Image (cartoon, rainbow, N blue to C red):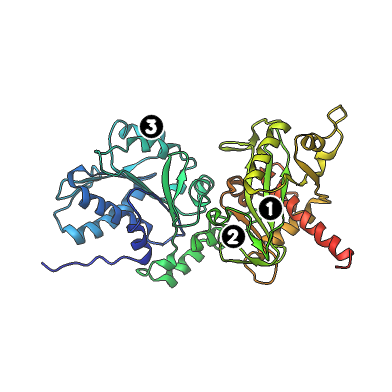
Amino acid sequence: METQTIELSDFQQKVMLLPEELDVFLGGGRGGGKSYGEALLALRHAEQYGAKARILYVRQTYKGIADFELVCRELFGTVYGTAARYNAAEHIWRFPNGAVMELGQLETHSDYAKYQGRSFTLLLSDEIGQYATPDLLDILRSNLRGPKGMPIRVVLAGNPGGVGHQWIAKRYVFKAAPWKAFLEPKSKRQFVYAPSTFLDNKFIDREQYSDQLNSACPHDPELLRAWLEGDWAVARGAYFASVLDEDRNAIDPAMWQTIPTHHGYRWPSYLAHDFGSSAPSATYVVLQSPGAIGPDGRYYPRDSLVIVDELATAMPGRPQQGLGWTVPVIAEEIKAMCARWCIRPAGVADDAIFANMGHSDGSIAKEFSRCGVHFSPARKADRLTGWNIMRRLLAGAGKPDVPGLFISRACEYFWQTVPYLPRDIKRVEDVDSSAADHAADAVRYGCLRLRNEVSQIRLSGF
């Protein structure tokens, strides 16, 4: 019998080399070879563990299952010929060594009844962006059980731009840099974000595929960018869509553990704060580059702003609802965050917190000051001025000769909300203030402080 060779792309090889103890999110653009990668992982799992291997692959629709069936027929047929049997009625693969792989549909909670009480050692799911929430996939994880010494694993795949875009980006994309392990709090498992695009897939006609994607999105350039580039910072019709780019603006938190120095002096730092109680408050640690190379080896032009840490008081999963924290509670958390960075708890905040509230406590700013956190007014002027400065800095990120705005992937509330803020339909130059704009407001105040500082230097003749 003639030996058949299975050829892998560089992306698929990299995925196969990830330790089995790590769960994986395959999350780039369309056409990157993610589905074939999942089939390869299933094949290896079946070969390694034989009759102990119980694999479940789920999609939201039966049509999606049919697409994956074709991928499996090609791969498994190459390896086993007719020795691997597929029951099309039951959607079950049976391998010669006793391993079993089931292709299942999971759209609603009633569909989960098919899997309740059953055990699987490898869980695969594709196109998870079709799920508006992660609830069903979270429940399915309870079915992962294996013999002692045998690793259990979850491998998920999806593209940006779907209905589940936000929860996926929050959970898997903006936790750490690509290909670096991080702890996913919900599952308490180590995950890796493994991105790819159609450019990584040498087995397709890439020029033709690009033309097809362009034809599918003639009036939606942001969705097209998401599909082509796998950029999770895009959001169709969003206010910052044209200037906020994950590749340019996101920085790796693992590389920014302390404030860098330049010629023996630490980079200037300050806080940017937007107050809220029933609504969330947001506070950021902002570093101002003196025109130097950062700890990640990247050059940050003079007056670039690097946001390295975040304190957000939003209810989990409810970005518009605050935790109801009082000023003393928020102040203590802000001081703890500042202590981690060895900086003074001081910065800029919304002008509104300096208004006298008409009772003995004075203003919110004075109450913060009594608690040891000192704010000065951002002097925000009109909103559009602040937004224009923030947009200009976001667009400048990555350019060698102009300042930019960079945000750590550890700033989860920022990445959960800012990329998706809609425009005000009555004033398209402005953000819709009814949206969860608290993180954006805080960052805007930080950008205005830079503008005011530069203006003062110019007026002084320096």
Q: CA distance from mark 1 to mark 3?
A: 47 Å
In which quadrant of the rendered view does residue 208 lie?
Answer: bottom left
State left or right for residue 96 relative to residue 6.
left
Which quadrant is the N terminus positioned in?
bottom left
**Helix or strand or loop: what does disc 2 sit on?**
loop
Judging by the rendered image, the residue that carries numbered circle 2 is 245
Q: Are marks 2 and 3 in contact (CB under 8 Å)?
A: no
Relative placement, left or right, of 123 versus 188 is: left
Choose between 257 and 443: the one closer to the eye. 257
Query: What amino acid is labelled 1 in the image?
Result: Val
What is the distance, in whole Å, between disc 2 and disc 1 at their CAs? 19 Å
Residue under the point 74% across and 55% down: 447
Type of amino acid under label 2: Asp
- Amino acid identity at mark 3: Ser
Where is mark 3, residue-wise? 110
- Residue 286 tag number: 1
- Disc 1: CA contacts within 10 A as few (<14), some (14-19) or many (>=20): many
Please indicate whether residue 374 sits to the left or right of residue 70 in the image: right
In three-dimensional space, the C-alpha distance between marks 2 and 3, rounded to whole angstroms, equals 39 Å
Q: Position of residue 386 (x, y in %)?
A: 77, 54
Sequence-wise, the earlier of marks 1 and 3 is 3
> Residue at position x 40%, y 35% from top?
139
Specify whether residue 430 is in view. Answer: no
Give SS at disc 1.
strand
